[in-house]
Image (cartoon, helix red, strand yellow):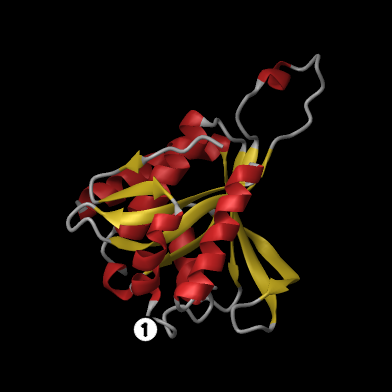
């Protein structure tokens, strides 16, 4: 999987590596309440497992994980990734069989330290990733999935312009180790032009 740096005005996304473990551990420390609905490892050992698994998924071609770095102070503020990356088995007589990029993916595993909340970082992170997904990969669809109880996350996803598709019952184990119902959202290729203009306007206001 191609390692790509995504550069914005207030944040840059760099490919996740083992050298980021210590900084990620510091960013995650003491924010347990903030991460009530999101799995964010606490401590070096847990973070090491988390990072190694993400890198293994990248090597398998199913994920592309990043660290989120503030341009202002060059500090790591959190992490995010493309995941559930899928290539459809187009038949050889279909023009899409020539694709070298994925067809669909999900954006998730996103978390930020407390100081980065409501700073515009999350919006720009999503804009950079969506722009890469639709303008470079030419994806048909990008999914977002969050704990149905996570009202802040659901509102943030809707502000991006993603469409709510429904509730997936008993979809996975939650961060609190209960059986989680998940809210599913998506943006499809035909909607990207409008969403892009929306996000450009929002990020310009933050900048």
Give whichever of 177, 131 is nearer the camera. 177
Relative image position of residue 204 (x, y in whole percent): 23, 47
Q: Residues within 10 Å of mark 1 (few under 14, many from 20)?
A: few
Q: Residue at x 45, y 37 (%)?
A: 132
Relative image position of residue 3 (x, y in whole percent): 47, 38
Would you identify the image quadrant in which residue 179 lies?
bottom right
Give whichever of 127, 29 is nearer the camera. 29
Tally of numbered discs: 1
Give whichever of 56, 143 is nearer the camera. 56
Q: In this picture, is 205 found above or below 27?
A: above
Q: Residue at x 38, y 47 (%)?
A: 14
Disc 1 designates what residue?
Answer: 30
Give whichever of 56, 152 is nearer the camera. 56
Q: In this picture, is 135 found above or below 60?
A: above
Whether residue 146 is visible here, answered yes or no, is: yes
Q: Is residue 70 left or right of residue 103?
A: left
Relative image position of residue 153 (x, y in whole percent): 48, 69
Q: Is residue 73 left or right of residue 101?
A: left
Q: Quadrant of the N terminus?
A: top right
Relative image position of residue 125 (x, y in whole percent): 38, 52
Q: Is residue 128 left or right of residue 139?
A: left
């Amino acid at each position: 999987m191609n390692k790509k740096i995504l550069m914005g005005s207030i944040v840059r996304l760099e490919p996740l590596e083992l050298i980021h473990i210590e900084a990620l551990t510091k960013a995650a420390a003491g924010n347990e309440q903030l991460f009530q609905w999101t799995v964010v490892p606490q401590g070096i050992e847990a973070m090491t497992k988390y990072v190694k698994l993400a890198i293994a998924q990248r090597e398998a071609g199913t994920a592309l994980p990043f660290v989120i770095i503030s341009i202002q102070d060059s500090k790591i503020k959190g992490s995010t990734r493309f995941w559930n990356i899928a290539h459809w088995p187009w038949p050889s007589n279909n023009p899409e069989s020539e694709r070298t990029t994925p067809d669909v993916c999900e954006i998730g595993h996103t978390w930020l330290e407390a100081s980065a909340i409501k700073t515009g970082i999350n919006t720009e992170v999503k804009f950079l990733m969506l722009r890469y997904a639709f303008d470079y990969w030419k994806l048909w669809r990008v999914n977002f999935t969050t704990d149905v109880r996570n009202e802040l996350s659901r509102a943030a996803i809707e502000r991006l312009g993603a469409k709510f598709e429904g509730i997936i019952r008993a979809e996975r184990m939650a961060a609190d180790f209960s059986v989680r119902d998940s809210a599913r959202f998506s943006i499809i290729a035909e909607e990207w032009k409008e969403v892009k203009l929306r996000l450009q306007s929002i990020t310009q206001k933050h900048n």
